[in-house]
Amino acid sequence: MALTQITNIVEPAIWLQYSKEYNPEKFDLLASSAITSAPPEVKAQMAAGGKTIDMPFWQDTSRAEPDLQDDTTTLSTSLAITASEEKARKIYWAKSWQKADLAGVIATGSPKDPLQQIADYVINYWRASYQTTIIKVLDGILAKDVATYSSDMLYSTYSDVAAGSITAAMRMSVAGITGARLTFGEMLNDAGTIVCHSKVYGDMLNQEAITFVQPHTLPFQIPTYAGMNVVVSDQCTVVTGTNSPKYRSYILGDGAIVQDEMLPDMAQEWYREPLKGNGGGVESLISRRHALFHPKGWQFTSSSVAGKSPTWAELGTAANWLRARQRKNIKIAYLETN
């Protein structure tokens, strides 16, 4: 358990007001069209009991050849429709921060100051956690796809060669994007967003292949590559190779990931322990969230979950995922490059 103590603060010899440093990170993935809010029926279940949400659906009928009419007593061969279900797992989170009163007094003269500053960082803490969770979910699906579904969502141009032997074909390219999109089959035009590491984005810039689009509803431009919106995040997975790292990019269609958040009772709570710090006092801030991150077309089986909610490692475990819909109806693909 971490505690903000005197050793964690800067004792000013000459009074200067504290400034703030924020982690250098962007949350553009959360605002992209690939992430959609949960429908009302799912939102309602977030406030209900249970750890999972079952989402049944009817599957289309088969495409068997039609029967040919004749004048015999032969009966037509009947077709049927069957049902399946997606399954989403709720996540129950909490995180706490502590500070000793004396640390605040020595830092700024106010015993409450460090914790008041922490409160300002809480929103970004949760936003970063949400974005990391989405990446872990996507990595878990890929692990299952490779293990069970013949890697039909993955296109790779990566080769574990020394830096001097990396060719243009191994790096991010329009041809690589096309290969990943074609894992959607004829639904390839449903791919609208690519999420990539800043190093991969640098390769795009060096190719002079980025086009900036100015939506009339936004005050900033959106980079596009091969006709898709580009989201840059250094949270994208980088796999260490023997000779060179492998960069994983995520190709997503609109609404590929359903996200929901619920603030529970006592979503934020302050807790004071006056006897701690040898009587100086210690105060805690506890923040709580109930959340859901569900890739459309999948079941979270919970086959390998030890606690009441899955950890990031468990979200990335192949055994916890099962495909519920046809490949072409899952708007997620992967491209791995040097």
Image (cartoon, helix red, strand yellow):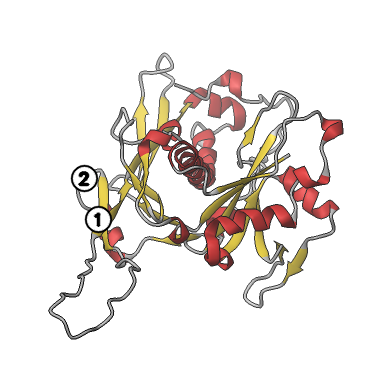
Relative to 320, does residue 323 appear above or below in the rendering? below
- The CA distance from mark 2 to mark 1 is 9 Å
Q: Residue 194 lies in what quarter of the image?
A: bottom right
230 on left or right of 329? right
Q: Earlier in the sequence, mark 2 or mark 1?
A: 1
What amino acid is at disc 1? Gln
In the rendered image, residue 111, in percent from the top left (x then y), is placed at: 50, 31
In the rendered image, residue 318, in percent from the top left (x then y), is placed at: 42, 35
Q: In the rendered structure, are the residues bearing label 2 and label 1 in contact, judged by CB atoms less than 8 Å apart?
A: yes
Q: Taking the image as drawn, is residue 46 in sight? A: yes
Which residue is at 66% across, 58% downward? 178
Q: Taking the image as drawn, is residue 21 in sight? A: no
Which residue is at 28% across, 80% downward? 68
Which residue is at 71% across, 72% downward? 214
* Helix, strand or loop under label 1: helix
* Residue position marked by numbered label 2 in the rendering: 50
Depth order, front residue of 254/214: 254
The image shows a total of numbered marks equal to 2
In the rendered image, residue 167, in percent from the top left (x then y), is placed at: 83, 41
* Helix, strand or loop under label 2: loop
Relative to 315, does residue 99 appear above or below in the rendering? above
Depth order, front residue of 274/131: 131
Alpha-carbon neighbours of circle 2 within 10 Å: few (<14), some, or many (≥20)? few
* Residue position marked by numbered label 1 in the rendering: 45
What amino acid is at disc 2? Gly
Residue 329 - label: none
Q: Residue furthest front?
A: 72
Depth order, front residue of 289/55: 55
